[in-house]
Image (tube, rainbow, N blue to C red):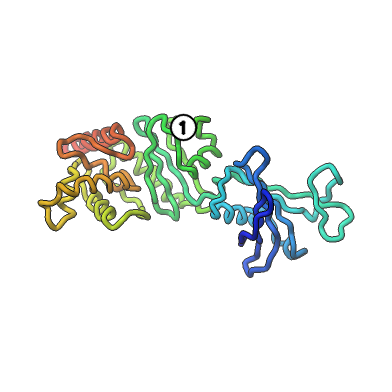
Amino acid sequence: MINQYRKLKQAEVYLVCSDNNQILALLFVESIFLDNRTLTGTLILLNLPFSASLINDQFLYQVGTVLYDFKVDFEQLILQVPDRSRKAAAGREPAIFLGDSVYPNRFQTKRFAASDFDSVSYLIFPFHKHNIVVHIKSNQIIQVQFIQPQQIVTDKNLRKALTKQELLTDAGIIKSENKILQILSQREPITPQLKEKTMQQFTDYFSGKLTEFDLPYVVQTGTVFQRKVWQILSQIPYGAVFSYEEVAERLLDKPDKAYAYARAVGSACGSNPLGILIPCHRVIGKDKSLTGFGGGVKLKGHLLDLEFIGRSRNRK
């Protein structure tokens, strides 16, 4: 829909085209003075009246989506476009002359938060003062992220989503409300069934009622070696633990060389994007120590305690 055309002083200029590649407008994008987190985008219509007939809120949303996908770093976006139906008092407000009109036309303004264009939905579960963030896109879980108590959120997209919902403190920490937080994508809505199923299964897991997940997920990252490790992790039963060396033994054709791969297995566990669903917390040191975990050793201990208790309860 839009293509970067050129830079003009502080502004970036884009060509805005229709689906059949007709040029509709020029889009001038620049940051607000003293606030580089907020961008303004002004559409100058070129193909009147055809272009004006296509401009509506949905069209402006599509323009914002493409800007977002260009990785333009902003938190708020203000798009403005001349409104043919509204005249402006000269000298009193921003305006532009359309065609041969005697009076200038006012601008129609639409405001967006950057998170309006995010294609990922977030479900955030509290567990022992930690926040477990489940990322969902295209109706599949793509990441399970661990955020420790008082840890600053560094994921830019998650920060923007939390900020819009007023769920982030000024210091960048998730506001603790001890309840499930839902931030749902407007761009790629997830099905109500998947949302409810995900909330129910994680809730049941954290309460010790669920021992096996049945949720759709996809692995989007990882080397061949890492993916082989994660496949083995997926086979570790609920409430059981393997050492890094034991994982390596199942990975190699020569188990006697497993000790040499223990560190590489640990690194692969640390790169696991789908913690809990791919249970890297069930891998411990050969001496039974809780070493290394993306969410911290304390969270690893809480998860193992939860499963040991759950396993004992289920045996009765």
Is 83 situated left or right of 141 in this image?
right
Residue denoted by label 1: 173
Tell me what residue is drawn at x 77 percent, y 64 percent. Answer: 48
Q: Nearer the viewer, residue 243 or 56?
A: 243
- Mark 1 belongs to which amino acid? Ile
Please give the name of the residue rendered at 72% of the width and 53% of the height, measured from the top-left corner.
Answer: 81
Q: Is residue 186 left or right of residue 230?
A: right
> Picture quarter containing residue 206?
top left
Which residue occupies the foreground of this view, 313 or 133? 133
State the image coordinates of residue 183 (x, y, percent, origin top left): 49, 43
* Quadrant in the rendering for residue 177: top left
Q: Which of the pair 87/245 is nearer the observer?
A: 245
Please tell me which residue lies in front, 8 or 167.
Answer: 8
Asked if 83 appears above or below 93 in the picture, the reply is: below
Residue 63, percent from left and from top: 62, 56
**Which quadrant would the N terminus be assigned to in this image?**
bottom right
